[in-house]
Image: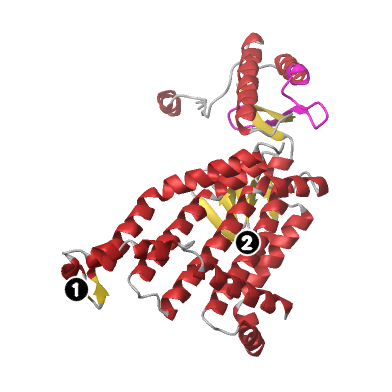
Amino acid sequence: MSTVQSLEENATQALNVIEDLDMGLAPVVQGWLTPVYTSKYGSFFQQTLFDIPLANLILAILVFLFILLLRKFFTLIAIVFLQNLAKYTKSYYDDKVISALKAPLRFAFIIVGIHLFFILIFKETDIVKNILNTLVVYTVFWAILSIVEALRGVVYGITDKFNHDLSKEMGNFILAILKILIMGVGLGAMLQVWGINVTALVASLGIGGLAFALAAKDTAANLFGSFSLLADKSIRIGEWIKVKGVEGTVETIGMRTTKIRSFQKSLITVPNHIVANNPIENFSRRGIRRIKMHIGLTYNTNSEQILHIIDAIKLMLQEHEGISQKDSLMVNFDSFGDSALNIFIYTFTNTANWATYLDIREDIHLKIMKIVEENGSSFAFPSQSIYVEQMPSEKIEHSE
């Protein structure tokens, strides 16, 4: 009930603002028309167009255009004044707030121009006043939302104290909820301007609460999914993940969806309840990457050469700065293949970075090639050897 009462008070204050929005200019401007009506051309300017005196209509248009053209100048004066005040503070966030107020302030001058226009043509009816009141409320809450966005860094600083790893995700979530609340209050204030009883409206929502809950069950599931993602710390912005067949880098974790940028640069939007309720493969958190390969040597390689090659490869991997020495490292003569003697190599790099991993693997491949060459062997390729015990002609001659 207190929230509704505050909305009513805001609406009343907005009405008072619009009543005084011309800052006393309307009577002054209207006074300028007295010499026009009493001049020798007064009969012409006293003619009406749509029941509006011609002189008033012309002056109203000129005043509106004057304010429209000079609104940037007026805004600049107000901004410079606020910036001079901000010089006495050490925080730079007040500068960001002032910068964020530029657009709402410019729009406020347009409202002043519209207000003066309707006053001068004697057409400021109750409907026009309600429209202007609505625009004032809209501008006020637009300014509030702009200030909240300008203070995003402050929110990140607060969430960083609670959890450094998820400061951005938690900050974005808090900002999203705060903006929704501000927009809800703003909508209620605008409805109040038009005489819509917000209390009755809120009460009526209770009647359709069940239907609303059923219709919004997916939204609620996504909302709780975002809670679980933040609580479990399953993913963070910038991490490379794979979930439900979707693979890429996490860009945002919102209240309803998680946006993933694929490696083809397309943006994939996944509902949070799907992310929260399915296995997540987080590649960014493994810290290492696996190298697994088989190399095949030709069959003319003898056992002594194979042992030297295995020992040299193992020593090379143990001394390589890109290979993790804390994890498994295996080099073994694995099998007799159809066309090669197979050596199995299994190890891990000490980085999960894709580009660095490729560089390390390339270097290892080249060094293995050099080791094989230095030991007098070569790599096998698929081939077949055919052994003929006796030529057909010899067999025929023998039978005769």
Q: Residue furthest bottom?
A: 207
Disc 1 element: loop
Q: Pinpoint residue 65: horizontal percent, then vertical percent.
A: 32, 56
Q: From what the image shows, is residue 303 above or below residue 146?
A: above
* Front-lying residue, 34 or 367: 34
**Amino acid type assigned to the residue bearing label 2 in the image:** Lys
**Residue pictured at 25% horizontal, 78% vertical:** 51
Instruction: State yes or no: residue 328 in magenta.
Output: yes
| Dot in front, 2 or 1 | 1
Q: In the rendered image, which quarter is residue 160 located in?
A: top right
**Residue pictured at 72% horizontal, 36% vertical:** 90
Q: From what the image shows, is residue 347 above or below residue 123?
A: above
Quadrant in the picture for the N terminus? bottom right
- Span of residues in magenta: 316-340
Q: In the rendered image, which quarter is residue 42 located in?
A: bottom left
Q: Is residue 389 left or right of residue 155?
A: left
* Front-lying residue, 174 or 258: 174
- Whether pointer 2 and pointer 1 mark residues with C-beta atoms closer than 8 Å, the reply is no
- What residue did someone put label 1 on? 47
* Res 28 visible: yes
- What residue did someone put label 2 on? 179
Instruction: State yes or no: residue 321 in magenta.
Output: yes
- Kindly report the distance in space between the C-alpha atoms of the residues bearing marks 2 and 1: 51 Å
**Amino acid type assigned to the residue bearing label 1 in the image:** Gln
* Front-lying residue, 138 or 180: 138
Quadrant in the picture for the C terminus? top left
Q: From what the image shows, is residue 54 above or below residue 90?
A: below
